[in-house]
Amino acid sequence: MAEIYQAVRVTDKVYWVGAIDWKIRDFHGYDTPRGSTYNAYLVMGEKIALLDAVKEPFKAELMSRIRSIIDPERIDYIVSNHSEPDHTGCLARVIRKVKPEKVFASKMGKKALYEHYAIDVEAVSTGNVLDLGGLSLKFIETRMIHWPDSMVTYIPEVKALISQDAFGMHYATGERFADQLDEPVLRRESDKYYANIVLPYSPIVKNALESLASLDIDLICPDHGPIWRSKEWVGKVLGWYGEYVEQKPTMKAVVIFDSMWSSTEKMAQAIAEGLIEGTADVRMINLHESPRSQVAHELLSAGALLVGSPTINNGIFPTVADVMTYIEGLKPKNLLGAAFGSYGWSGEAVGVLENTLDRMGVERTRESIKVNYVPTGDDLLKCRELGVNIARDMAERI
Ligand code: FEO
């Protein structure tokens, strides 16, 4: 049909009808320099189901892609795998237009959809199967990956897993399939997505991966980013997730800091020199000019976190507070580290940072360093030594 937006064939029976958000650069605090997609899928048995919807402003794009292959009113069922508004923002309007026979979500999804939009849906649980005639939708709840309502839908006849946020990434492209894209970029964006969205739920993800191992999967169709088709690509992304849940420490040391008058920055540089001497792989991140999601991304495969802040008004610098709050919530594991910073008179910042590192379970293997006003040459040598010693501690753990 003559539509601006076209559906993309995934299999004879499954079509991508989502939306491409080329311009988003901040996804609730996560920087998205490559944009994103909101994926939705039409599953065409004798009955037709729409799996997931899109963010509210993209309703016209979704409907156009659907119209490119069928009259939207032919849709019999809508399934909401995940209630977050990037997948349900236009759902109420889509339901009004399509008038489906039924709308399904998990029990917690039913609650969330009602509380967000006053939409009343039918609840399904793990093991429930919706027969479309020739195709079936098998529901599997994946509670807390990453919301309580989250579930995935398996279509055994085409060996496809419609996986909502899991195995997704924020990456807007004209290509719909991972095998059409550059693998190192996919790996980077997948890592970043996991680190910023899924990381706190890693123990649950680990269990879910074990459950998924019993399914025969040729296709993973996530709600963001490219579709993984073929056993090879499915195996790749499952393998990446297997690494993420373990978070094995490496020789990567992430040094994050901000500075008022360059004293804390000089300390960071001296620490980095020591880390390099100790053969650590250093990532220096000045928080004044770097997004918080970059820190989370780097920590996913790190062995150490060193954090520096000057003391300001009896506390830590606002940019450092922002990032520490963010990464504490993401619960990275298997890190060792230390705190450092300069101060003028009261000097609380390093203590505040130590407390945060302790709450995060970061093992502080070396003494923190505080410097009054401006680091002397001896102070900087101590910072360098701290870096050397942290690198040594890292090497002993891998
Ligand atoms: Fe893509 Fe959790 O929403």
Image: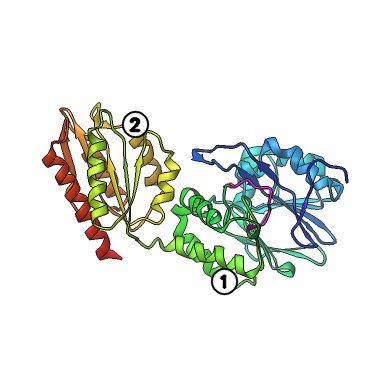
In the image, 271: left or right of 116?
left
Does residue 176 show up magenta in the picture?
yes
**Is disc 2 placed on a helix, strand or loop?**
helix
Q: Inspect this view and state whether residue 132 appears.
A: yes
* Label located before the other in sequence (2 or 1): 1
What kind of colouring is applied to the model shown?
rainbow
Q: Nearer the viewer, residue 251 or 116?
A: 251
**Horizontal and vertical percent position of residue 319:** 36, 33
Does the numbered disc 2 mark a residue whose Cβ is under 8 Å from ligand 1? Answer: no
The residue under label 1 is: 213
Residue 54 visible in the shown view: no
The residues colored magenta run: 171-178
Q: Residue at x 81, y 67 (%)?
A: 134
- Residue 43 higher or lower than 173, as above or below: below
Q: Position of residue 106 (x, y in %)?
A: 63, 54
Q: CA distance from mark 2 to mark 1?
A: 44 Å
| Residue 198 included in the magenta stretch of the image | no
Q: Nearer the viewer, residue 167 or 379?
A: 379
Identity of the residue drawn at 52% across and 38% down: 28
Q: Quadrant of residue 91 in the image?
A: top right
Q: Which mark is residue 318?
A: 2
Which tag is nearer the camera, tag 2 or tag 1?
Answer: 2
Type of amino acid under label 1:
Ala
Q: Nearer the viewer, residue 104 or 360?
A: 360
